[in-house]
Image (cartoon, rainbow, N blue to C red):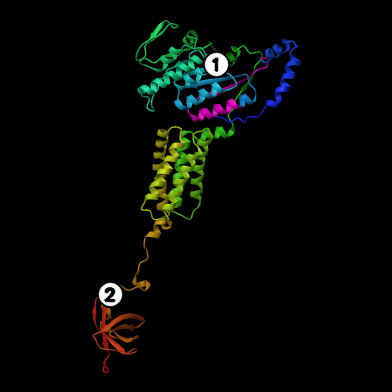
Amino acid sequence: MRQVQRWNFRWLLPVAVLLGFALAGTSAVPAKAAAAGDSVGSTVYVVDADRSVESGLYQHLKRAYEEAEEAKASRVLLVLNTLGGRVDSALDIGELIRESKVPTTAFVQGKAVSAGTYIALNAKQIVMQPGSTIGAAAVVDETGTLVDNPKTVSFWTETMKSAAELNGRNPDIAAAMVNPSLTVELKELGRTKAKGEVLTLTAQEAVKAGYAEFTADTEQAAIDGLKLDQPNVVRYEASAVEKIGDFLTHPAVMTILLIIGIAGIAIEFMVPGFGAPGVIGTLAFVLYFFGHYVTGFAGFEDVALFIAGLLLLVSEFFLPSFGILGILGSSALVAGVLLAAPNPKSALLSLVVALVAAAVIVYFVAKRFAHKGVWNKFILRDQLTTDKGYRSSANKADYLGRHGIALTPLRPAGTARFGDERVDVVTSGEFVAPHSDVVVVKVEGTRVVVRPKDENE
């Protein structure tokens, strides 16, 4: 609820008393004339609600009603055409309509079923387009299956009845729209709603049952039926940011952003040094959460959860955690994406598609730039070959019979030089002074045995 600052107006009491005495002798005619004049040139705000009932619609209507109140409009014509949606969002929209200073006339254009019916019942008036329907407000899950939980059905039934009674409509009809287990006699319609059915009213039946004031073919006809003198019609237009948000939250666009984001970040981690993939991937994720934020789907906590997951994944590359940081980071990323979406089930499907597509992209990029991959830091690729100056320990057999010079005292182990090579050698037990000539008499694996060179050799 919006917090209202309270001011101390007790100092105005004497002034009010004096004004009361001053106005006591005046005629009431000017006040009546002013009241009658309010209908001349009255502003009617036309607001479209032709989408699924979710938090995005609530944010859209909240901005529209705030603008209507600031403009001191006398009426909001809420154009409804929806198959329903989330119960919690419908409750928020119903509260918004009830607490608004501007009364609402709901114009059902096509259909207002399920949660859309509840929204319409909160309006002061309901006008229906010929051929439109209202009702079928039973609670269903995401798969469209009826929810038979007694507490849930009882809560929604009483909520619908309260909304109907709010503006003098028959609550039994509202209950018949929700609870299929009820048998309701519809005296206004001359028939009975049988058990197992969920009530839906046509435009003519809604007028006959007192659920709609009249029917109208167009929005203008609905406004004309309100009997306002010279109404000033203003159609509420979503802002550019809101339109961008609607575009970014389209399922196809959302999936593309996830593909770009996942592939870009993965390529930057696996093939570092480019910079561009990381920037593009980060920008894609920023657009994803920006779109969901401005449309009311995501909050700061969802963005914070995603950023925390990204930081945990980066930490996995520098801190040995045996995969714990990677698992926590991946879980946080997935949770942030799903919680930011209006429909977690649809978002999960988009995420799976994005992961598969991103994996294919990363595979081809990694294959193309294999020589720059981060995995090269963990793989020993240097070859200790003879042409690079390395000699295998298994090839010391060719030292047998070679002559060299002792570089250090051999007691009995030491170092000798054979040509340009320094070799660790041992004697059979005798002492050999440095700079003495030696000859290799035995080679056993890496063990090279020498003896002093005979003067006759």
Q: Is residue 77 magenta?
A: no
First of labels 1, 2 by sequence position = 1
Badge 2 amino acid: Asn
Residue identifier under label 2: 395
Foreground residue, 119 or 48? 119
Quadrant in the picture for residue 388: bottom left
Residue 328, percent from left and from top = 40, 46
Q: Which mark is residue 124?
A: 1
Q: Residue at 37% of width from left, 60% of height from top?
A: 379
State the image coordinates of residue 283 (x, y, percent, origin top left): 51, 44
380 w.r.t. 55: above or below: below
Q: CA distance from mark 1 to mark 2?
A: 99 Å
Q: Residue at x 48, y 43 (%)?
A: 304
Q: Is residue 50 magenta?
A: yes
The reply to whether residue 260 is in sight is no
Which image quadrant: the N terminus?
A: top right
Give the magenta range: 39-66
Q: Say what amino acid the circle numbered 1 marks.
A: Lys
